[in-house]
Image: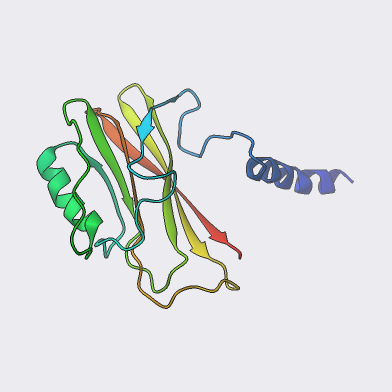
């Protein structure tokens, strides 16, 4: 009886984590303050067809860096969309790119941006389609971005991955 309780306890904790309970991601301090974020689109990943062939996590703090990153975010769109206006005196852009994937159904999402002292934690979830999912037969390169308060400190990315079953 005692061993079954010890075995069941971790699953009970995991069940709570998936039920909407607010549990911080590993690596993010419990006392970190959430930073306000602005999404340039609806509350969904920014783009599926970016020009990021490799995975990337970037804190963009200057206009010149933004110009370079935006060219990759825009990918092969014709005509390329104009870059959102960013006030780099007070703001920075957090970018999370998944890199090229062989089919549709992949996504990346910035879930939370939090700060404690002079360090910013960015929680990122990478999603892949389950084996039973129908996906498009085209290469994709998902990317997400948010605009937040500018900081000069270190930015730490906390990674999580999930498989979505259809």
Q: Which of these two is toward me, 43 or 133?
A: 43
What x and y, as percent, mark residue 67? 13, 47
Residue extending furthest toward the bottom: 137
Q: Position of residue 118 (x, y in %)?
A: 30, 24
- In the picture, the quarter occupied by the C terminus is bottom right
Residue furthest left in the image: 64
Q: Residue furthest front?
A: 79
Residue at 23% in and 57% down? 74
Horizontally, residue 113 falls left or right of residue 94, namely: right
Give the residue drawn at x 18%, y 49%: 82
In the rendered image, residue 2, in percent from the top left (x then y), is placed at: 86, 43
- Closer-to-camera residue (18/10): 18
Q: Please give left or right for residue 148 compared with residue 110 in the image.
A: left
- Residue 52, image quadrant: bottom left
Q: Is residue 125 above or below residue 112?
A: below
Q: Position of residue 44 (x, y in %)?
A: 44, 48
Position of 64 with respect to 55 (left or right) is left
Q: Residue at 20% across / 64% down in the picture?
A: 78
Say which quarter of the image contains residue 107: bottom left
Q: Is residue 76 above or below residue 35?
A: below
* Residue toward you, 53 or 72: 72
Return the residue nearer the eye: 6 or 166: 166
């Amino acid at each position: 009886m005692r061993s079954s309780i010890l075995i069941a306890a971790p699953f009970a904790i995991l069940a709570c984590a998936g039920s909407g309970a607010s549990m911080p991601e590993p690596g993010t301090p419990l006392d970190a303050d959430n930073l306000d974020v602005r999404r340039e689109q609806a509350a969904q990943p920014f783009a599926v067809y970016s020009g990021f062939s490799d995975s990337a996590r970037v804190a963009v703090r200057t206009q010149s860096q933004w110009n370079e990153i935006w060219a990759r975010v825009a990918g092969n769109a014709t005509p390329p969309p104009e870059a959102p206006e960013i006030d780099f005196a007070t703001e920075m852009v957090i970018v999370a790119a998944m890199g090229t994937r062989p089919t549709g159904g992949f996504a990346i999402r910035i879930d939370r941006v939090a700060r404690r002292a002079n360090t910013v934690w960015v929680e990122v979830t990478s999603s892949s389609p389950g084996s039973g999912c129908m996906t498009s037969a085209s290469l994709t390169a998902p990317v997400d971005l948010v605009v937040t308060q500018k900081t000069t400190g270190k930015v730490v990315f906390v990674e999580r991955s999930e498989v979505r079953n259809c």
